[in-house]
Image (cartoon, rainbow, N blue to C red):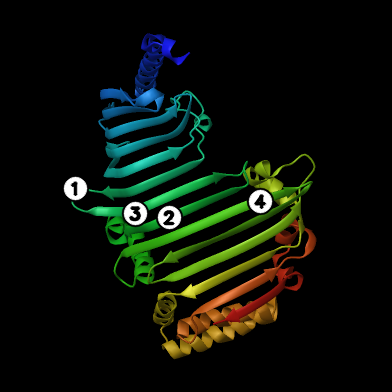
């Protein structure tokens, strides 16, 4: 039978696919123009396509705003079905003097995984229509003509609470606090410089890495929320946490609405839960000691003694656990400890709103353990 199959039989299919690809290319061009039509003028160098509708590429996009701002995009790539793309990627983004922002913003690559549409909706449509399963960004830079103000090596956001998990990664965020403070109102600069000196040990260069993961599991009317994350400010401090919260939801609620509505979360009934928080010294706390002693006009030894006395005072009011936390912080200031770890077990059959109503009673309700390392 195969010998009777002529290549001419492929012609209708080829024509159909060519027409479909051409139609999608025209839609991409039309949608991109519609996105910017009210804000200024968009020019597109050319639009090409890959094999069998696999990829559309708009190259050399240049936008000029009515107010004078400019936007360049080297490539705007739509992969997969135009109506349900597998991903949308923008390469070589540069934003200059846009919306009263004199700085230039550059991004090497921005990718959206499984976005709801190939092009974001124009201003007259809700942005919520532009949903995505993941976002990744590579090499962001914010700079003036004289110098760089901030940079970010990478950012990744993945997951969907409808599917039960989500995560965020921030890699190598660097901010030139000195230059940013010079651009702030003059009356605010002194306090900002003090905070900058404490955080950066006088360098004025803030460097940060962060991550967060969250998952939920549903079993009938019960939900288990779990989350962990960390923030590291180089040469300052580290903060890490893990949280596990089993709970019963209010009638008619589900985890998706729970995460979107803080008031609803407060009405959920906790079935216990655990929290672990670790605060580690990476250079910040001895600097706090120096600053505190200077502001009080006393020696560092005297300031430490005052701080220890205050820790005991807090303990008398709020309990021994709170005093242990305060003593741990003082020990980090003195250089005799590296970290304070706090473990809290929450009471069962309680709500977040009831716990927040009487914070002074919390130490008596919690099983709280403190370890100073």
Percent across and percent down for residue 355 are 73, 61
Label 2 and label 3: CA atoms lie apart by: 8 Å
Label 4 and label 3: CA atoms lie apart by: 29 Å
Q: Does residue 197 sit above or below 138 in this rendering?
A: below
Reading the image, the residue beneath label 3 is 153
Residue at 49%, 74% in the rendered image:
280
Q: Does residue 55 sit above or below 341 in this rendering?
A: above
Percent across and percent down for residue 170 are 43, 55
Callout 3: helix, strand or loop? strand
Q: Residue furthest left?
A: 146
Label 1 and label 2: CA atoms lie apart by: 26 Å
Q: Mark 1 or 2, which is nearer the eye? A: 2
Callout 2: helix, strand or loop? strand
Residue 94 falls in which quadrant of the image?
top left
Callout 1: helix, strand or loop? loop
Percent across and percent down for residue 239 are 51, 67
Q: Earlier in the sequence, mark 3 or mark 1?
A: 1
Label 3 and label 1: CA atoms lie apart by: 21 Å
Reading the image, the residue beneath label 4 is 216
Reading the image, the residue beneath label 1 is 145
Reading the image, the residue beneath label 2 is 170
- Give the total of numbered labels: 4
Percent across and percent down for residue 89 are 37, 36
Residue 45 falls in which quadrant of the image?
top left
Query: Is the C-beta separation of discs 2 and 4 under 8 Å?
Result: no
Q: Mark 1 or 4, which is nearer the eye? A: 4
Q: Residues within 10 Å of mark 4 (few under 14, many from 20)?
A: many
220 left or right of 283 in image: right
95 left or right of 214 in image: left
184 left or right of 233 in image: left
Q: Which mark is residue 130?
A: none
């Amino acid at each position: 039978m195969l010998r009777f199959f002529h290549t001419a039989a492929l012609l209708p299919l080829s024509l159909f696919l060519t027409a479909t690809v051409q139609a999608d290319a025209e839609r991409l061009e039309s949608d991109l123009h519609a996105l910017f039509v009210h804000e200024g003028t968009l020019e597109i160098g050319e639009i090409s396509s890959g094999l069998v509708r696999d990829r559309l590429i708009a190259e050399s996009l240049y936008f000029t705003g009515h107010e004078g701002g400019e936007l360049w995009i080297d490539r705007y790539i739509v992969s997969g079905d135009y109506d349900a793309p597998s991903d949308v990627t923008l390469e070589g983004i540069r934003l200059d003097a846009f919306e009263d922002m004199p700085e230039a913003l550059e991004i090497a690559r921005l990718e959206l995984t499984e976005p709801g549409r190939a092009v974001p909706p124009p201003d007259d449509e809700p942005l919520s229509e532009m949903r995505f399963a993941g976002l990744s960004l590579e090499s962001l830079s914010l700079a003036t003509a004289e110098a760089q103000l901030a940079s970010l090596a990478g950012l990744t956001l993945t997951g969907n609470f409808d599917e039960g998990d989500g995560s965020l990664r921030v890699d190598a965020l660097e901010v030139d606090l000195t230059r940013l403070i010079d651009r702030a109102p003059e009356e605010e600069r002194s306090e900002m410089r003090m905070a900058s000196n404490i955080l950066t040990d006088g360098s004025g260069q803030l460097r940060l890495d962060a991550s967060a993961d969250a998952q939920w599991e549903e079993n009938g009317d019960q939900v288990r929320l779990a989350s962990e994350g960390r923030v590291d400010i180089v040469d300052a401090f580290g903060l890490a946490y893990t949280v596990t919260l089993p709970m019963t939801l209010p009638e008619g609620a589900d985890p998706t609405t729970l995460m979107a509505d803080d008031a609803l979360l407060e009405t959920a009934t906790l079935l216990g839960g655990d929290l672990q928080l670790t605060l580690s010294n990476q250079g910040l706390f001895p600097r706090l000691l120096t600053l505190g002693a200077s502001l009080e006009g006393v020696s560092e030894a005297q300031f430490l003694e005052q701080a220890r006395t205050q820790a005991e005072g807090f303990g008398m009011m709020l309990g021994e656990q709170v005093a242990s936390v305060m003593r741990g912080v003082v020990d980090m200031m003195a250089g005799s400890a590296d970290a304070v770890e706090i473990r809290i077990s929450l009471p069962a059959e309680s709500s977040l709103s009831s716990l927040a109503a009487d914070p002074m009673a919390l130490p008596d309700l919690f099983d709280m353990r403190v370890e100073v390392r």
